[in-house]
Image: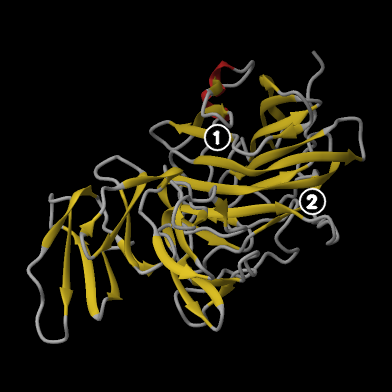
């Protein structure tokens, strides 16, 4: 988070900052090595965070996020005649604000996305126009990056996304960003990967010390088109499965809440099992798509509801398109499912999110796809590499895909985490083995 900016310009040290408390004016002063000039306001500018400063083409530049709920990014330049009127960096937004650095004859800005989007974006300015924003690929942050130039490269460094306390960095040569790397010893390292790895039907589990998970919500943001290529069964598609565990001995031992794309139909589902067989097998259409592709910008969300004992009593499914339009919101009451009684309900004490094939144990091959998953709950969550001892039984979902997941932090308890996912067209597909979860079979219409 940028609280103030600092740079040297015309043989003085310039500093700019946001006012204290509710004062959202931007202030500026300079230091000549002996004394500070009286603070003055950057005219017409305001911010809820504070500005970044740098020098470019013989001018001093400032950039900042707007005030209050204004998430636009603004900039101004200063020369011997003072600060120019502020202008908008077109087509971009941020929760926090940008960092600035001059590199290879351009002024670069980088920032975290808006509205909780943890992705990092950047753009360059040639003195007249800003280039369209681009994503620093495969990275994310809950705060945003800092920029600097070293050994002929532009460097960015940032703290990880929600719950990830590690510090990362990458370098840019004017065309490409290098893969992110961890600054050793800065922050807390990742949790050990599950025994089968991080991909397909093998991901971390999240739990709350074996207590019922309350108000669990999973949000999936697609940042690169997820494109289906082939399956080993009749269904064309892929899915996101919330595979959840009840406490040992509860009737609804295996609870599965999912959204899957099958033959261009985006569907939701509930598939819950107990020791005496299937309790719920309910599937419903959310929306239709032109092809077996989930476009970049789409958002999928599954939110669970609980009763006073922590039992899961309902699930809500939301689909938002890449223009921000709500395409579907469907709420399902578990007690409204045929034959389900209050005695069949159970809490969940651990869960795993899997990006896999669609249904019926099918394996999907995807040609592209990437995004992030936000895990949120009223209960404090902890990342685990295996099932906790309190769950009914260790089971494996049968569907698989050539997906992979990012590491998540160890020894952190938080109400929210961010994890990234992608598609590998080169690495072997992970196929976790073990006791299979009862088959995901969609009932015939």
Mark 1 is surrounded, within 10 Å at the Cα level, by few (under 14), some (14 to 19) or many (20 or more) other residues, namely some
Q: Which label's residue is closer to the chain start, 2 or 1?
A: 1
Quarter holding residue 225: top right
Residue pointed to by mark 1: 301
Q: Position of residue 272 (x, y in %)?
A: 66, 32
Taking the spot 86% from the left edge, 40% from the top edge, the residue there is 229
Colour mapping used in the image:
secondary structure
The answer to whether residue 163 shows anywhere in this view is no
Q: Position of residue 221 (x, y in %)?
A: 58, 42
Taking the spot 23% from the left edge, 56% from the top edge, the residue there is 83
Does residue 165 appear to the left or right of 258 in the view shown?
A: left
Quarter holding residue 175: bottom right
Mark 2 is surrounded, within 10 Å at the Cα level, by few (under 14), some (14 to 19) or many (20 or more) other residues, namely few
> Which residue is at the far front?
81
Image mark count: 2
Quarter of the picture containing the N terminus is: bottom left
Q: Position of residue 191 (x, y in %)?
A: 57, 68
Residue pointed to by mark 2: 435
Q: CA distance from mark 2 to mark 1?
A: 28 Å
The answer to whether residue 389 shows anywhere in this view is yes
Quarter of the picture containing the C terminus is: top right
Q: Position of residue 378 (x, y in %)?
A: 39, 44
Quarter holding residue 255: top right
């Amino acid at each position: 988070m940028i609280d103030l900016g600092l740079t040297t310009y015309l043989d003085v040290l310039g500093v700019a900052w946001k006012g204290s408390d509710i004062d959202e004016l931007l202030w500026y002063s300079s230091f000549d090595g002996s004394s500070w000039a009286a603070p003055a306001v950057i005219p017409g500018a305001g911010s809820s965070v504070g500005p970044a400063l740098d020098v470019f083409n013989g001018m001093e530049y400032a950039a900042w996020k707007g005030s209050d709920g204004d998430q636009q990014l603004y900039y101004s330049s200063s020369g011997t005649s003072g600060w120019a009127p502020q202008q908008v960096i077109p087509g971009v937004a941020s929760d926090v604000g940008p960092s600035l650095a001059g590199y290879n004859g351009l002024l670069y800005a980088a920032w975290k996305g808006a509205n909780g989007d943890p992705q990092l974006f950047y753009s360059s300015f040639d003195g007249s126009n800003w280039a369209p924003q681009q994503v620093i690929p495969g990275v994310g942050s809950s705060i945003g990056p800092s920029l600097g130039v070293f050994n002929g490269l532009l460097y960015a460094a940032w703290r990880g996304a929600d719950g990830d306390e590690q510090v990362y960095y990458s370098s840019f040569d004017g065309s490409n960003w290098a893969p992110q790397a961890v600054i050793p010893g800065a922050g807390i390292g990742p949790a050990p990967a599950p025994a089968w790895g991080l991909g397909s039907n093998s991901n971390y589990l999240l739990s709350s010390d074996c207590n019922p998970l309350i108000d669990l919500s999973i949000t999936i943001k697609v940042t690169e088109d997820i494109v289906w290529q082939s399956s080993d069964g009749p269904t064309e598609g892929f899915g996101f499965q919330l595979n959840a565990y009840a406490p040992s001995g509860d009737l609804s031992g295996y609870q599965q809440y999912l959204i899957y794309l099958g033959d261009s139909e985006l569907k939701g589902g509930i598939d819950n099992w107990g020791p005496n067989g299937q309790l719920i097998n309910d599937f419903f259409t959310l929306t239709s798509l032109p092809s077996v592709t989930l476009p970049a910008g789409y958002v999928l969300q599954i939110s669970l509801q609980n009763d006073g004992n922590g039992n899961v009593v309902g699930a809500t499914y939301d689909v938002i398109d890449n223009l921000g339009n709500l395409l579907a919101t469907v709420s399902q009451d578990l007690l409204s499912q045929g034959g389900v009684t209050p005695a069949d309900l159970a809490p969940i004490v651990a869960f795993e999110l899997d990006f896999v094939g669609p249904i019926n144990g099918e394996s999907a091959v995807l040609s592209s796809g990437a995004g992030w998953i936000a895990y949120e709950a009223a209960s404090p969550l902890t990342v685990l590499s295996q099932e906790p001892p309190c769950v009914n039984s260790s089971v494996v979902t049968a569907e698989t895909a050539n997906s992979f997941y990012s590491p998540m932090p160890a020894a952190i308890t938080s109400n929210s985490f961010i994890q990234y996912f992608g598609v590998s067209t080169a690495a072997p597909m992970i196929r976790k083995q073990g006791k299979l979860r009862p088959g995901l079979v969609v009932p015939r219409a």
